[in-house]
Amino acid sequence: MTTPRTVSRRDFISTGLAAAGGLVVGFALPGGGRRLLAGEESPDGVLNAFVRIAADDSVTILLKHAEMGQGISTSLPMAVAEELGCDWSRIRVEHAPAAPAYFHTAFGIQVTGGSTSTWESFEQMRKAGATARVMLVETAAEAWGIPASDCRVENGVVLAGDRRATFGSLAAAAGRRTPPDSVALKAPKDWTLIGKSTKRLEGADKSAGRAVFGLDVRRPGQVFAAVARPPHFGGTVASFDPARAKATPGVVDVVAVPSGVAVIAKSTWAAWRGVSALEVTWKDGPGAGVSTRTLLEEYRALARTPGLKAAAKGDAEAALGKAAKIIEAEYDVPYLAHAPMEPLNVTVELGPTACDIWTGTQMPTTDVAAAARVLGLDPSKIRLHTPWLGGGFGRRANPRADFVAEACEIAKRVRGPVQVAWSREDDIRGGYYRPMWASRLRAALGAGGLPTAWSHTIVGQSIIAGTPFAMMIQDGVDGTSVEGAANSPYLAGIPDFRVGLHSPVGPVPVLWWRSVGHSHTAFVVESFLDELAHAAGIDPLEYRRSLLRNHARHLGVLNLAAETFGWGRPLPEGRAAGLAVHESFGSFVAQAAEVSLEGGRIRVHRVACAVDCGPVVNPAGVEAQMQSGIVFGLTAALRGEITLHRGQVQQSNFHDYPILRLSDMPEVTVRIVNSTEPMGGVGEPGVPPIAPAVANAVFSLTGKRLRSLPLRLP
Amino acid sequence: MKLTVNGREQDVDVAPEMPLLWVLRDTLGLTGTKFGCGMSQCGVCTVHVDGKAVRSCTTMMSSVEGKSVTTIEGLAADPGHPVLRAWHELDVVQCGWCQPGQVMGAAALVAKNASPTDAEIVSGMNGHLCRCGTYGRILAGVRRAAEIGRTK
């Protein structure tokens, strides 16, 4: 997601007495309506708590962002605990419910995306912790008849001389106090927890199978549902015969829904068997004839025409027309499925006047809106519960709320709670892919070999067109289509450049996929830059250093990655190196990769990665996200491809949509730049540089420039 | 049909061709074992049948009748299990969906081979996919689990 990099400061601290008699600290929206008074958590339950301290000394931290593997369930509690001074072992985390108090301060809805969670919540979480600490200390000081300044806090205990009181023993009285108007936050130099590698809070529960994910939700009397969806995008049901499905053991019912035909059963397995037994006649829709092979040809043709202006300076065409030396290349990348290991699922329990929904989601606000619309209920009557997410990568952040809306359609037609589970085939063939992209680039090289003119035309579907995010489209240009290309640091020193965009409309549904536009622009720009370096006869590292001399953070990670890798040192026979650097989501990442060929297949042996994401909350988490991004990016670089032939998605499961395996895993070294620059994200920025780093290494090894993903040697 | 799950005898009234995975999850309510692909491609659903790691998504109920099944719930009844300890020490987990299967696979591997080489770990664990890319830590985790197991 494209991120406005500002956090609005409209929070009002609100505190009160928890229902169970403890202290609760939260943030209320301004304007009165949701500003809470001390005394009750909220009129109808817990609607805005960020931190709860209970009589048993437990500290519950509510996450307004979803934990889907990226580690915010640990980094955000670290921010709270730094200021609160609680006992780390007594911290529990819960996903917050869907409520306006948890809206993203930059996006204006409740959402996890754009690698924003830690920096976006950093101040709120520290404020919540500091407010609670001040109120606990004031409570103790008052009881002891001493000034608050004589008290200190250690590991969940307020201390003064030989007096001590645990947070739990103070919580109820603290909850009746008026919160302080403002709290002072620690200076970074005084941090003791922030910046220290900390293990994942819920790790043990997940390893032991105790953690409850969406698909693990079990309600009394729950039935299981699966859906037969059209074989191509935009298709509809012409007619169906439920007889064979209904005769399948375990099948309870068959119901038509707008997205297809749903089979209700006593187990997920029986529901899937019922779907296989269904006889459905489908009516063609707009996607019936789509083939990616012909679509890519159309994209390539479009890329040879200028498109809308996304960025420009001077007159690129005129400069290219006069140039003595022009380098030209065309690149493309395919549609990609997110394929989170936990397939999509939703559990809906519809009551007479309200509805409970459990689903691993990155975008609760649009899910609640969709559920309310489908069920004919006021949004306040929808209670959305977010269990742990078995991966998300963007697929669980759908502004169109496809999986939630469909599950509510089913729930309307079923008595009692129902869980809708997607099979892997449903997931791989279900659309909402990373768009297919084509690019055409031309550059003129000057006397010193550096580019003097640059033209880049991008073709691909807009992710946000037709969604509530469409308001971010400016002059027809969806920023998520060109991010990383229209603002490439290499453009700064080029007198004449133009970046153009075509956004063809198509029937294949598209969505943000981990690193969004950067997932194609980094590959294209960093590969093309390598072509220019080669044409200029300059080492790729030196070439980048020349162009990035005024971009300190790019240069910093580039040099650190090169040093860590040992760039320029001789490599074993049959191996070669490539590198790439890219900024995304407020962070800067450079990666160098060593590759060889094994039986015609590209093998990546090791990767050196350097990241500058500003101040680091949890170094272990940053390292894990860089490793994770590299693996995710390598799957796209070496394996991932969704193709369509006459409307039919040709992949279906991990045998034909392979993802990286342990045997493919390179040795990864991550170095983190010590930085006081603004905090950026880490969930996505590790992904973009790896594909070009590998492609550049393959060129160095073979002399073959691979301009399509996944990388395949002819 | 009868089978033993985590030491407890169970009698289930299901179709003989029903995969063990769904018997565990939907009939017995043991949701620690996860679903990932349904065709033995990802290892997420791994359990032990008579001590051997199997993919429960393609194991028919009829083939485990009368046998002893251990799921992640059964293994984790011992929180000091070398694999769980190693997983915690190395902070292996990210989203966590694949990890019960990884743990079951790793436990079977180190039970069979107390000192696996890296190549043996890779070949033993290669059927376990992880979309979050925790592979580096999985490799290190199995090494460490074997080490803990040897000194136990």
Image (cartoon, rainbow, N blue to C red):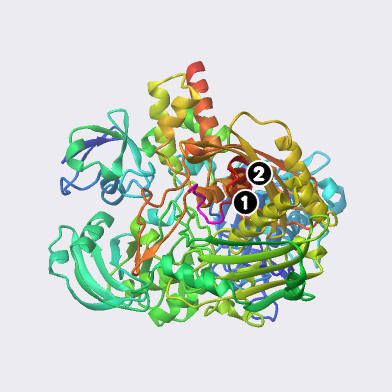
Residue furthest toward the top?
B151
Q: How far apart, in angstroms, are the residues tagged by discs 2 and 1?
A: 8 Å
Residue B76 in view: no
Chain letter for mark 2, please: A
Instruction: Find out whether residue A595 is within the magenta segment.
Output: no
Label 1 crowding class (10 Å Cα cut-off): few <14, some 14-19, many 20+?
Answer: many
A269 or A684: nearer the viewer = A684
- Position of A295 with respect to A586 (left or right) is left
- Position of A607 with respect to A194 (left or right) is left
Dot 2 amino acid type: Gly
Tag 1's secondary structure? helix
Q: Residue A89: x percent and y percent?
A: 62, 41
In the picture, the disc for residue A692 is 1
Mark 2 in CB contact with mark 1 (< 8 angstroms): yes
Query: Which residue lies under the disc numbered 2?
Result: A578
- Position of A47 with respect to B130 (left or right) is right
Q: Residue B142: x percent and y percent?
A: 49, 29
Label 2 crowding class (10 Å Cα cut-off): few <14, some 14-19, many 20+?
Answer: many
Magenta portion: prevailing SS class = loop
Which region of the structure is painted magenta?
A707-714
Instruction: Find out whether residue A713 is within the magenta segment.
Output: yes
Q: In percent of the image, x 43 and y 59: which residue is there?
A: A642
Quadrant position of residue A571: top right
Is the residue at mark 2 from the same chain as the one at mark 1? yes
Q: Residue A462: x percent and y percent?
A: 55, 74
Quadrant position of residue A157: top right
Chain letter for mark 1, please: A
